[in-house]
Amino acid sequence: MRAELEKIVGSAAVDERAVRDLWPLGIMDERAGKPSTPVLVARPTGREQVAAILVWAGANGVSVTPMGGGSGVCGALSPEAGDLVLDMSAFDRILEVDEANLTCKCESGVNGLRLEEHLNERGLTLGHFPTSLPGTTLGGLIATRSSGQESSRYGSIEDMVLGLAVVLPDGTFAAPRPGPRSAVGPALHQLWLGSEGALGVVTGAVLRVHRLPESVIGGGYGFPDLATGLESMRAIMQSGIRPLVMRLYDPEDTAFNGYDLPDGGCLLVVANAGLSGVARAEADAVKSFAAAAAAADLGEDPWLRWQKHRFDLSADRLKTFLAPPGAYLDTIELAAPWTVLHDLHARVKPAIAVGGLALCHFSHAYEQGCCAYFTFGGSGDTEPDARSAYIRAWEGAMSIALELGATISHHHGVGRARVRWVADEMGGWMRVWRSIKESVDPKGVMNPRAVGGGKP
Ligand SMILES: Cc1cc2nc3c(=O)[nH]c(=O)nc-3n(C[C@H](O)[C@H](O)[C@H](O)COP(=O)(O)OP(=O)(O)OC[C@H]3O[C@@H](n4cnc5c(N)ncnc54)[C@H](O)[C@@H]3O)c2cc1C
C-alpha cells in the first residue's frame, strides 16, 4: 500500500503515525491504555493527486479520511488499522481576495486564523470565529458545518460558502459554480457542509467576506435570572438587531467566569457593530431592552474581558485537563426554539451534573431560537468510573434533546460521539442521506466514521 501511494505523491509525502481528533472520549481511552493504531498518512499537493489516491483506494478497498487541523471534537477523524488519512495541509494557498465583489477564493487546507488575518490586513473579515480558530482548516470547518462566536451577525459556515471545489470518490472534479446565487437546480455543494469527509475531498472554496465594521460597541448586563435574560435575547433578535456577539451565561457559568451577581443572576455579554451611528443606535436599543428587564448595566468590562479570553479554550488546555487519570470533560451544544430553551436547560443541567462541573451559556442566537452550550466535567476514582459518568451525561443530554425536539448538535457534528442518536434526529432524512452516500461513493471509499456511518 505504501509503495503505491509513494508512486502517486512521492515518498517524502507518505508517513505512518497515529491520527485522531480531539474527541474527549478518544483521549480518555488512550489515557486508559487503548492507543490509536498508526495508519498511513499521505500529503497530496494537487487535485490530480487527490483524484489518483481516491481512484486507487476504490480499486483496493481502502477507506480514506481527509484531515484538516484535527480540532474536531466528535471522533469524525479517528481512522482504524488499514485506513488511509489524507493530510490536506499542502492545500494552503489563499488564491484571490476580490475586494470589489467581496469574495475570497482559497484552498481547503488554509488555517482558519491565517485566513482571517489575511482578510483583516485588507480591511475585510470572513466573520467566522470558532473558539478553536487557530487550530482549524477551512476544509474541516466546512465538513463539520461549524459556527463561530459572531454567527448572530455573519451567520455560520453555510452562509459564507458560495461555492466549493471537490474531488469526488471516483476522481471527478466539481468546481465552484457562478454566484452570487443560482437557481440552476439545487445548491448541491451544500451537501458537503456537514458531510465529515463522507462524500469526497473538499479542495477549495469561494467565500463571502465582509468589510470590517467601522465601530464595535460592547458591554455587559446582569440579569436577575435566566428566564429574563433569555426573553431579552429573544426580543433583541426579533427586533431586527444583529449583535456581533451575544452570550448569556447561566448562574453557574456566570460565577465560573468570575462575576459576583446576586443569587441566580446571569451575565449577558453583548456587542453591536457597523457604521458608527448604526452601532451606537443598536447598542442604545440593547440597553433599553436590558433596562426594561431590570438588568444591571455592568459597563464595558465584561466585553473587554470576554475579548481577551475568547480563544483561551485551546486544544492544549483540553489535553491538560484530560491528562490526570479519571478526569473527564466535554461540551454538548444543543439548539432549540426560544419556547423550549428554558425547559431544555432545566432538564439537561442535572443530567450532565454527574461529576460536579455543569455549566451552560446561550450563544448563536436566531429569531427562532438559540444554541444552548453545556460544559460538564469531573473525575472518576477509576477509568471505568470516569467513562461511565461521561457516557451517562451524554445519554441524558441526547435523550432530553430528542424528547424536547431540540437538535442534538448545533455545530460540532456527529462523528463517533453522536452515532447512536443521529438516526433518531434525522428520521426519514437518514434514508436520503444514505442514498446520497451510496450514489456518490458506491465503493465506500470515504470516511466510514462520518455522519452515522461508524460505530460509537
Ligand atoms: C477547544 C475547542 C473549541 C471549539 N470551538 C468550536 C466553535 O466555537 N465552533 C465550532 O463550530 N467548532 C468548534 N470546535 C470544533 C472544531 O474546531 C471544528 O469541528 C472544526 O470545524 C474542525 O476543523 P479541522 O480543520 O480541525 O477538521 P478536522 O478535525 O481535521 O476534521 C473534521 C472533519 O472534517 C473532515 N475534513 C477535514 N478536511 C476536509 C476536507 N478538505 N474535505 C473533506 N472533509 C474534510 C474530516 O474528515 C473530519 O470528518 C472546537 C474544538 C475545540 C477543541
Image (spheres, helix red, strand yellow):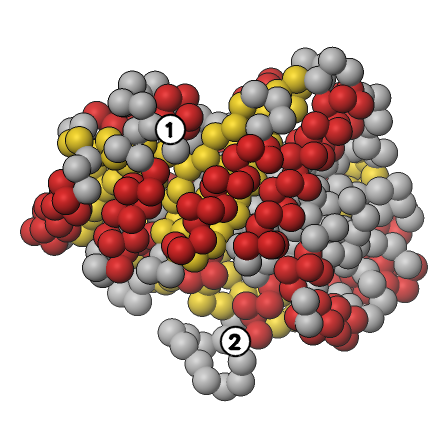
Q: Name the residue under label 1.
A: 251
Q: Mark 2 points at which residue?
A: 187
Give the x, y percent position of residue 236: 24, 52
Residue in front for this viewpoint, 251 or 236: 251
Give the x, y percent position of residue 190: 54, 68
Residue at image position (64%, 34%) is: 393
Decide: is 297 above or below 287. above
Callout 1: 10 Å neighbours few (<14), some, many (20+)?
Answer: many
Q: Is residue 110 left or right of residue 152?
A: right
Residue at image position (17%, 37%) is: 294
Q: Given the current orientation, which residue lies at the most extreme left position? A: 277
Q: Is residue 88 visible?
A: no
Quarter location, residue 439: bottom right
Quarter of the C terminus within the rendering: top right
Tag shown at residue 303: none
Q: In this view, does 244 lie to the left or right of 407?
A: left
Mark 1–mark 2 distance (CA, rounded to whole Å): 42 Å
Quarter location, residue 63: bottom right
Q: Given the current orientation, which residue lies at the most extreme bottom position? A: 184
Give the x, y percent position of residue 237: 27, 55
Which residue type does callout 1 highlight?
Pro
Callout 2: 10 Å neighbours few (<14), some, many (20+)?
Answer: few
Decide: is 440 above or below 416. below
